[in-house]
Amino acid sequence: MRIATVDIRCCHHREVSLAEDTLLGTSNRDGFEFVVYTLTTEEGLSASMFGFAGRSARGSGELAAAALKPLLIGRNALDREALWHEFRKVDRFWSHLPIYSYGPADVCLWLLGAEAAGQPLHRYIGGCRTEVPTYLSSMFLKTADDYVAKAVAAKAGGYAAYKLHPPGRSVGEDIEIHAAVRAAVGAEFTLMSDPVAFMTLDEAIRYGRALERLDYRWLEEPIPDENFSALRELSRALDIPVIGTEVLAKHPYSVAECVAGRVVDAVRADVSWAGGVTGVLKTAHLAESFHMNCEIHSAIFQPLELVNLHLCAAVKNCSYFELLCPREKFEFGLASPLPVEGGIATLPEKPGLGAELDWDLIDNATVAQL
């Protein structure tokens, strides 16, 4: 089952904006840039997957095409492990691709294998469950009332939990927002917090202790992931679990010290930034061997989210499936909505991904094909 062609589309989807009702208006985002990889075998079997592209789909696509086409074309699509390790060498010898470049290729390899085996991806990986509780994650909202409204709606919708990305204007204001949300949803509903990296150690300790009093489930990435010493000190100072590693490059090796040295209490990984299905499995199994959870992180785009869901169902040490809120802002890329109802995600049983990509949207968004 050798790979005959590798096609990379560079896409710009302008029909959605995150600026409205959020603090993202200053980012000047005109829709979403993404790439779509398609790997086709000599037998005519093909698999496609979205990929993150930062601020430039064309730039991301050109880099990926230059490095990945020579690596993949002519190789057996089932040699995922060999290709994953060979990519590490290719990347080191002056490719130096963004952390999101290889993930979609690895996902396509797994989908080709699952399709050929006639199995849904989660069973092909090694099934563990067929339903996964789902939580919603906020955008960076403007006011406490905005966070309260979204959290109350998440609870009413049956979701398992709600996670705040606070505005970050001040630690004091962020704590007040978290207190307002807790008061609104009550003591029994699960809440988490992700201030996205830019606190000092002292601020993170103060913030974490406030979350402990408010009975939040975890504190995620209050300090940049690469600051191991500060994160280790924070984890030891707090009772609330501290979670990190989502943006570390080169999983699982970069995560190994975080696990073995208890830099954090649980790790993060997703198919976009951790090197595809292979990378997430390596990180999740590494964490499991240390009795640590690997909480799978949103990959933003719905096709990648569906792959994340397959992984949530194929490992034991992940509590939830994460989706960004408002969901309708991100519901593009698949021909049908993600299988989430009443806060429960149900795994597809069709072979491979279990859903079709929205090729009309992809065609309309394509600005270059490599």
Image (tube, rainbow, N blue to C red):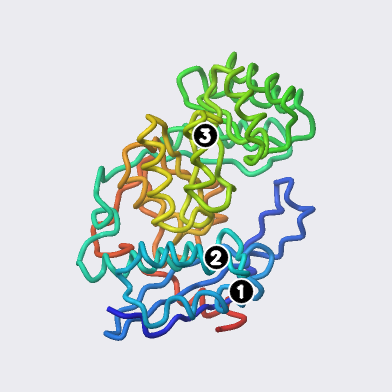
Q: Are marks 3 and 2 in contact (CB under 8 Å)?
A: no
Q: Residue 320, how many percent across, how many down?
A: 41, 38
Name the residue that disc number 2 marks.
Answer: 101
Q: Which is more toward the observer, 337 or 170? A: 170
Measured in 3D between alpha carbons, the distance from the residue under mark 1 to the one under mark 2, in whole angstroms, is: 8 Å
Name the residue that disc number 3 marks.
Answer: 162
Residue drawn at point x = 25 percent, y = 50 percent: 126
Q: Is residue 167 left or right of residue 246?
A: right
Q: Amino acid at mark 3?
A: Tyr
Image position of 323 with respect to 8: above or below: above
Q: Residues within 10 Å of mark 1 (few under 14, many from 20)?
A: some
Looking at the image, tell me whether mark 3 or mark 1 is earlier in sequence order. Answer: 1
Q: Amino acid at mark 1?
A: Leu
Q: Residue 141, how many percent across, how many down?
A: 69, 40
Q: Are marks 3 and 1 in contact (CB under 8 Å)?
A: no
Q: Residue 2, how many percent across, how many down?
A: 31, 80
Residue drawn at point x = 58 percent, y = 37 percent: 150
Q: Residues within 10 Å of mark 2 (few under 14, many from 20)?
A: many
Query: Could you say whether the residue bearing mark 1 is in a helix, strand or loop?
Result: helix
Q: Nearer the viewer, mark 3 or mark 1?
A: 1
Looking at the image, tell me whether mark 1 or mark 2 is earlier in sequence order. Answer: 1
Q: Residues within 10 Å of mark 3 (few under 14, many from 20)?
A: many
Name the residue that disc number 1 marks.
Answer: 63
Image position of 157 with respect to 176: above or below: below
- Residue 76, located in which quarter of the rendered image? bottom left
Measured in 3D between alpha carbons, the distance from the residue under mark 3 to the one under mark 1, in whole angstroms, is: 36 Å
Q: Is residue 199 left or right of residue 42?
A: right
Q: Residue 359, how many percent across, how many down?
A: 45, 76
Measured in 3D between alpha carbons, the distance from the residue under mark 3 to the one under mark 2, in whole angstroms, is: 30 Å
Q: Are marks 1 and 2 in contact (CB under 8 Å)?
A: yes
